[in-house]
Amino acid sequence: MTNEVKSNSSWNEYSKLVLKELETLASGIESLSSELKTLKEAIQRLELREDKVDDVWSPPQMKDQIEKVQAQEVFKTRAITVFAVIQFLMASALFAQKFL
């Protein structure tokens, strides 16, 4: 009977050890699961930032747009000057017609 008692005692100790290891593994899995969830959330935030970055101008794009705006401003100045000169010439021609 002592062998059976020792065997039962050994089995009880072994089963407790196995249960303890299983609990340790389960807590480790839960920890990894929560870390994985955190990583997934971080990846989603990075993807959102990446989408926003696509909407931002790069320096070369901004330089091109500035050059286009400056060209438009020069064209506008020239067009207004030409229009004013033509208006002045027309007014001068009409004024000269009254005296001739």
Image (spheres, rainbow, N blue to C red):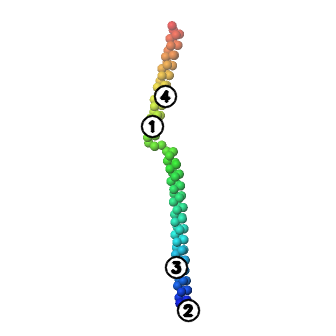
The answer to whether 38 is drawn above or below residue 17 in the figure is above
Label 4: which secondary element: helix
Residue under numbered circle 3: 17
**Residue at the extreme top of the image, as rendered:** 100
Identified by mark 2, the residue type is: Met
Q: Residue at x 56, y 92 (%)?
A: 1
Residue under numbered circle 1: 64
Is residue 25 or residue 2 the one in the foreground? Answer: 2
Identified by mark 1, the residue type is: Asp
Q: Residue at x 51, y 8 (%)?
A: 99
Q: Residue at x 46, y 31 (%)?
A: 71
**Label 2 Cα neighbours within 10 Å, binned few <14 / some 14-19 / many ≥20:** few
Q: Residue at x 53, y 51 (%)?
A: 48
| Lateral position of residue 60 relative to residue 16, left or right | left
The answer to whether 78 is drawn above or below residue 36 in the figure is above
Q: CA distance from mark 4 to mark 2?
A: 111 Å
The image's mark for residue 100 is: none
Residue under numbered circle 2: 1
Q: CA distance from mark 4 to mark 1?
A: 18 Å
Which marked residue is nearer to the observer: mark 3 or mark 2? 2
Which marked residue is nearer to the observer: mark 4 or mark 1? 1
Counting residues from the start of the chain, the first of labels 4 and 2 encountered is 2
Residue under numbered circle 4: 76
Counting residues from the start of the chain, the first of labels 3 and 2 encountered is 2
Counting residues from the start of the chain, the first of labels 3 and 1 encountered is 3
Q: CA distance from mark 1 to mark 2?
A: 95 Å
Asked if the residue at tag 1 contacts the one at tag 3, i.e. Cβ–Cβ closer than 8 Å, the answer is no
Label 1: which secondary element: helix
Counting residues from the start of the chain, the first of labels 3 and 4 encountered is 3
